[in-house]
Amino acid sequence: MDFLEAASTLPSRVLSGIGAAWSRSRPGRVAHLLLQVLASPFRGKRVTARQIGEIFLQQMYFTAVEAVPIVVVLATLVGGVTLIEFATVLPRVGNSSFLGDVMVLVILRELGPLFTAFLVAGRTGSALATFIGNMKVHGEVDALESMGIDPVRFLVLPAVLGSTIGMICLSLLFTASAIFGGFMVAQFLAWAFPGSLGLDMDLASFLEHTGAAIKLLDVVVMIAKPFSFGMAIALLACLNGLALGKSSHEVPQGTRSAVVDAIVVVVVLDGIFAALFVLPQVGVYIP
Amino acid sequence: MSEILSEACGLRFGYREEEALVDGVDFQVRRGDVRIISGESGKGKSTILRCLVGLEQPMLDDLGSAAGQVFLFGEDIWDIPHWRLQELRKRTGYVFQNNALISNMSVEDNIAVPLRYHTDLPEEEIHRKVQKWIDMLLLNGHEDKRPAHLSLGMQKRAAVARAMAMEPEILFLDEPTAGLDAKNTDIMLSLIGNLRALSNVAIVMVTHDLASAKPLGGRIALLLDGHLRRARTMEELLMSPDLYERDLVRETDERSAHFDHASDFPA
């Protein structure tokens, strides 16, 4: 009888064990926080701009506006270097007229979102984890709780929104700057080595060439990637900040985890995007 | 008999699974009450306070249910959804031992946080209400300062102002005079007394120093070996058959002579 009773409760115990292990695991905690963020606007009173506006604007300003100079410089250099590499390689394989397509493919789909995500993980991810971690360590998160203020709605929701929108803006800026930077380098090479690399084109034809290479799928990827990267970076930063205890020495550990986790997750998400969007285009079937 | 605002029944709690820091705690606060929880440092006074507002998760008994019950405004806080607990907390104020003011906000913004979050009041009305608490807690001229630029006494007063912003029915004070000099302790106790006189807010104060609790009056519950004893007045404790309690109050009486003028502080 005992055996039968134990056997009958086994599936539910196994399921609850799996559930407990999942909720303790890092992916489980991220998923839980994501659900909390998505649910927070619908709990209690409706969200007002006054509740989340200040932190949202601070986050947008820090993530997007303050990072503009570094993104423009970095993107121009990356665009220039990428163009030089391909401008020297493509003639060797027979046709340099694919330069526009290659630039779009590499910058718009891959390097733009990835470089921006690494930059945002380093800047925003670390700052956000430190900010929330310090609040946690100094009892400020408990103070919010004691006032009946939901820390997820008050801190995490605006931070995630601000970081995600900021990340999309930055990624678009990076892409535009990199393509423009590529053009500048093309101009310079055409001036320095006339006719040698087939790069002597004016701005109008360069933009036409590049614009013609952009497909609808590229536009989807250009938005979807930074959206998911930005959300992942902000969620991981908030999770690592909120997971801290009461000791100041945990703050740098939380910050480090936030940045490292974000970089790993961004690369994994990039792989998933490649599998979803790019591989089917070249005939690879993913079941 | 007035309404019970906060209650713990058979509360058992510890930070480690096997070891309970406090056990079998029964505690009640009614509207307008003053309750002091006192005892030695590190024995769980603040933990009881945190449990009373649900800042700690319940310790589970052998059957997996919460060990004891905690009620806030008649609702079992370990048995209601988190959003409901947040609703109940709007009717309470809590002053942390380390003040826990939000460090990147000014004093004025700190006090305005709950008003901006919970109410639809226009900014002018919020400013007016905040200014009232700033005046009452003697923080004039420091509204725009960040907490780090305030003295400890001012930080504590700002924390009290923030806790009072929503005009709570019950105010939890965790060591509100810890670390203050005699003058600032006097000021703080007088201000708390004034708040109580003006708003009839119930007060639960945790302190390791009974001398600082004396001016507030009210009943004192002593925490000893993880057990909270029945709340009694200072006079009742003085008549207690328990030598420890009598000695504690006598010692307090000797040390509290300088607090006697606290009530003379201007309102």
Image: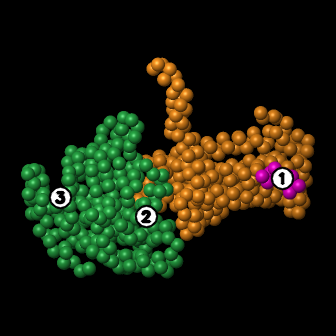
Chain colours: A orange, B green
Q: Which of marks 2 and 1 is in front?
A: 2
User: In the rendered image, which quarter is residue B250 located in?
Assistant: bottom left
For the question of whether residue A46 can be seen, the reply is yes
Task: Tell me the element at label 2.
Answer: loop
Vertical placement of residue A87 versus B201, above or below: above
**The magenta segment:** A210-220
User: In the rendered image, which quarter is residue B234 located in?
Assistant: bottom left
| Chain assignment, label 3 | B
Both on one chain, marks 2 and 1? no
For the residues bearing labels 3 and 2, Cβ distance under 8 angstroms: no
Q: Name the residue under label 2.
A: B90
| Chain assignment, label 2 | B
- Say if the magenta span includes residue A219: yes
| Residue at 80% from the left image edge and 51% from the top image edge | A218
Task: Farthest residue to the front: give it.
Answer: B1
Instruction: Give the residue type that dot 2 points to.
Output: Lys
Report crowding for label 1: few under 14, some 14 to 19, many 20 or more residues within 10 A (C-alpha).
few
| Residue at 50% from the left image edge and 67% from the top image edge | B117
Instruction: Give the residue type that dot 1 points to.
Output: Leu
Q: Mark 1 points at which residue?
A: A216
For the question of whether residue A196 can be seen, the reply is no
Residue B80: % across, % down = 45, 51
Report crowding for label 3: few under 14, some 14 to 19, many 20 or more residues within 10 A (C-alpha).
some
Side (left or right) of B163 relative to B183? right
Give the Cα distance between marks 3 and 2: 29 Å
Task: Tell me the element at label 1.
Answer: helix
| Residue at 19% from the left image edge and 68% from the top image edge | B215
